[in-house]
Each structure stands twice: as structure tokens, then as C-alpha cells.
Image (cartoon, helix red, strand yellow):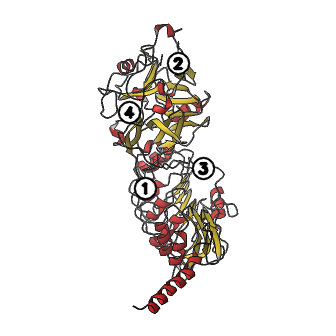
Amino acid sequence: MDNKHCNFHVLLLLLLLLLVLPLFASADGTTISYEGTDYPQDAEYIDLGNFVVTDFDAFTAFLDQMPSLRQVDMWQNRMTADQCDMLAARYPDMRWGWTMVIRNRDHEHLVRTDYTSWSTLHNDTSAKHNSEDFSVLKYCWNLMALDVGHNNVTNLDFLYDLPNLRILIVACNTIEDITPIASLKHLEYLELFKNRILDISPLEGLDHLMDLNLCFNRIEDLSPVLKLPNLKRLWMYSCRKINAVPVGEDVDAIRAAFPNTNINTTHYSTLGGWRMITQTKRDPHYEVILKNFGENHLHPRTEYVPFEDSWPSEDVVIPESEEPLELLAPQDFSDKGYMLPIDYSIGSAPKASGYTGNDTYSDSTITVSIGSGVYEDCQYWTADILLKDASQLRTLAASLNGSFETTGQMDAIRLAERANAVLAINGDYFSSTEKRGLGYIVRQGTLYENNLDPVGKWNALLMDVLLVDEDGDFTGIHQPQEGSVPAHINGKRVLNSFSFGPILVENGRPVDDFRGTDRWINMAWMDPRQRICICQVDHLHYKVVCCAGPSQKNGGMTLHQFADFVATLDVKIAYNLDGGDSTLLFFRGNKVNELGYQSQRKLTDIIYFASAE
């Protein structure tokens, strides 16, 4: 090749570079140019305004130059499902402001990703959408009310991506399997009428559910309704046989269990007061349904409106972890200068001179005082603990060396004495077979179990988790799912964590929503039982509370009673542990909560408070 040709190719290459580079970078390198607009290269948010993307290759090339970008608004773009999926897969951490298109043969719906409520507003004459059409709804990051009634939905898997739903209408479809609905823990209103449903067991554990319409289905067993403790309205006409009033022992049991619930077995799906109480007066909840969705396609609404009696929507925000903890790898806490080592060595033996009375112990590192009383008709005991150092709150297993690598059981008093505990309580029964090997278990700074159920399993074992950080402070996480528990909490390492629950008190107030506590292990939360919890009052200030079980002299406590009572004791957070016959409050060589008629189960593990003198 001669010099003329070489020069020509060099000039051509330079010309191409001059044409391409302005698309991406300004002269000083601090901005990226796209379609005539300069954007800071470190921007976390951009808005494309009225610009409509047509060349997605050029668009992704632009986005690739923006490493800090976390949100892109492009509302003027009518995005197809394929375009959404492509961008979401390429930039998985991005929040998108899209207008998505759901098309049918004679109409289309435009759905923005920031909608909090949405309905197709179909009727019997509308052209139908299928299940796949609704897959794009997963990009609506906070959808709380959804109506896809009067369609041809057969598969509800798209609901797994909509965990915040409070209102769901899937009536008048051809649905047989409702398993995905079990993942909607916040659901309050559910219309299932006119489908082909046989099994409603996935509804068990939807503790927020207040309105349920089952009319015109093929349901074989109605007993799962008994696991819906907060039902206010239940419509069941023709839920088993076409145009027939349901009868049977399960129907009788439902009526007996819910004397204050409006149960209708004789009226058509939307009649008898489901929508209209009188010719001019709507049911209060149906009035809110119209506020969420609008009355027809000419007047749609897309902003979620809660019911007057809706549950509080105070969701726990779980901070992201940079790296998960490594199983069986002890964390290094040498920088903390703890008074006791973070391992399975035991605490210093309590001094005889520290017992200043039958109910108190005090030395330079720990103070414990025991109290008791009667709440309503139930005996209770408390322990107030002040520590000098976070290492004095410790855990020990009933294994040969005290670690949690193997399991075992031991007499409760013997295990507490083995630890040199000033005060000890039972733990979370970490190796219980009822947990199916699930849980997030950190003990003395070592992760032993990181096995939580994924999103979407209707029979998921979802336990509240308590994290105790390196400074001894408590953080509770409501029913974390697979991969969601952070290695650090508020920037601090985790010393111990417990998988049982539920959380009873948060920010000093009793929790009244236990989010399906009977979903993984029978808490008997509505029954009076023997119970125990561990609480934090302030930094290095803790409290333990336990109550007697039901007997001729004691009533026991329901979980709500227990939470209400514990909240009166000025604690910031309280976490329920394994109660029943596991309940142990050990002090001065004895079981404090001993009444003589309740047995003590052998324990797999304890939580204890140790002296460091």
C-alpha cells in the first residue's frame, strides 16, 4: 500500500473519531454528551425529558459511560416488554422511569413505572389480555393496588415481582393455581370470584387480609380461611358447586371462628353488599377501590389510596451489604479491645460478694436485678441488665466445645452453670427440625447458617431475625428472604444473630402485625402460652421478660398480650425467643421462672450475660 492510501485511511479514521466522540465526551472529560445534551459523568440521575430513544445501541453506549447512574427517567418512550427486559438485564441496579405499552387487538394500555395503582378497567365485552402481557408490571417499583379482572389470566407468576400489593383483583379469569398470592404478605383486599380455583391453602398466613371474595370457583377445602385472623368480609356463594350455597363442617367452623365477620353464602359475587350496601350507599372499602382505579376507562386513577382501616405501611429498609459473611470464618474483632474474647470461652465466675440480695448482682462490669409481678391474670418475671462491654452478651451451644458447628442438648441449669453465667436465658433453638435447616445464625462473630427461603414460596419459613452488632445494639429485620441479610448493620459487624421471632416491640411501640408468624413454626400467637423475649433499653442496657404458661393459677399470654405488656417496660426493641417448655430465666444457680408445675425442656443453646472481672 502506497503512502497516499495510508494517509487517506488515517484521515478517514480521524474523521470517524471526530464524528463519534462528541456523542459521549466533552473536551474536559467531565461530561458525557448524548443527543445534544451534556450530562455530568458522575450523575446518579438523569431525565431525558421529551426525547424519544430510537437507536438503543447508541443509548446503551451512552449509558455505559455513566458508571454512577442509578435512575433514568424517559417517560416519553413507549417501551415494549422486550425493550424493558433488555435494559433491565444490562443495568440491573437501575431504576427506570418508563411508560410501558400493554397491547391488544383493539386497544392498548400505557403503564408508567411510578404508578402505585393500576387497572385494565375491563368488563365482559373487553378484548382480553393473557398472563404474559402483564409481565412488564414487575418494573412498577411500588405498585400497591392491581386490577386485572375480566382477562384471560391463567398464570399468576408475575405477582412474585409485586411484593407491595395491598389490593388485588383477578376475578373473571381462568386461574386454577393461586400459589403466587402467598408471597403478598401485605394483601388486604382480594377478589378471586369466577375462576377455576380448587386449592386456597396458599392464602394461609395472609394476616392482613380483610376482604375475600371466593364466589364461583371449585374449592374443595375451605378450612384455610380459618388461618386468616383479620377477615372482615367473606363472600362464598357458589365457591364449590355452581349456583349452590356452600355447606359442610369447614363452613360451620368458619362461621364459629369469625362471629364478627360479614360472611355471605347466598348472594352473587358483587351483590349482597359487596359493592353497594343500599341503592345509593357503597361499602366503604368498595368506595376506596373506585378511588384507586376509577369507575371506567375514561376516568382512570393510578395513585394508591389506603382503606381507612389499612395496616400501617412501615417497611424496614435493609441496608445493602458489600460482601456476604463467609460461612464458618470467624470475624476479627481485635480492634475493639473487648474485655472478653469473641469465642466460646466462658465468662468470669460471678463473685459471691456480688450478690447483694436474692434478686440482685453487681460488680464493676455488670449489674443484674430480678423483678416479678402479675399482668392481667398471668405471672411474669423480668431481668434488668447493665453491661460494661458488648462482649459480655454471649452465646453458647450444648456441644462439646460450646460452638454451633454441631448440635446437642443439655440440661438447662447445667448449660447455664457451664457458661459461668450471671444471668442466662434459652436461645432460639437454632437446630430445631421445624426450621428445616433455615435461618441466619451468627454466634460469637461466626456465621453458621445463611439459608433463608427465596421470594415466592407459598410455604416459606420466614422468620424475623435479630442482629446484635459489635457495639451490642439490636436491629430487627422482618422476615428477611434469601440474600437480604446484610453482613454489616449500620456499618457495624454482627456479633450474634437469632432466627426465631417475631419482633414484639419496635421504637418503643408494640408490633400489632406479626406478618404470618405461624407460617414457619406454630407460635400459637392467638393462644395463651408461656413466652420469653430479649429486649434492649439503651446502649449496653438490656431486659429479659418471660411469663408463665396457662394453668389453674395463670392465664398465659397471647403474642399480642405479651407484646403490649413488654412495651410498657420502656424498651426500644423486643424480640421473641423459643418459649413453651424451653423458657428459662437463670439467676444465682436457679431457674427463676420455676412454678413447680411446668417442665423444662433440654436446651440446644443459651444467651447469657457474663462478668468480666
Label 3: which residue? 313
349 or 379, nearer to the observer: 349
Q: Secondary structure at mark 1?
A: loop
Q: Secondary structure at mark 2?
A: loop
Position of 584 relative to 567 (above/below): above
Most distant residue in the front direction:
3
The residue under the point 36% across, 27% down is 603
Quadrant for residue 26, please give it: bottom right
Q: Amino acid at mark 3?
A: Ser
Q: Earlier in the sequence, mark 2 or mark 3?
A: 3
The residue under the point 54% across, 85% down is 15
- Which quadrant, please, contains the N terminus? bottom left
Label 1: which residue? 456
Q: Earlier in the sequence, mark 4 or mark 3?
A: 3
Q: Secondary structure at mark 4?
A: loop
Q: Position of residue 287 (x, y in %)?
A: 66, 60
309 or 34, nearer to the observer: 34
Q: Residues within 10 Å of mark 3 (few under 14, many from 20)?
A: few
Q: Position of residue 221 (x, y in %)?
A: 39, 53
Question: In the figure, is residue 48 to the left or right of 209?
Answer: right
Q: Earlier in the sequence, mark 4 or mark 1?
A: 4
Question: In the figure, is residue 384 to the left or right of 288?
Answer: left
Disc 1 to disc 3, how far (Cα)?
20 Å
Disc 4 to disc 3, how far (Cα)?
31 Å
Disc 1 to disc 2, how far (Cα)?
47 Å
Question: In the figure, is residue 109 to the left or right of 498?
Answer: right
Position of 68 relative to 99 (above/below): above
Label 4: which residue? 429
Label 2: which residue? 365
Q: Amino acid at mark 4?
A: Tyr
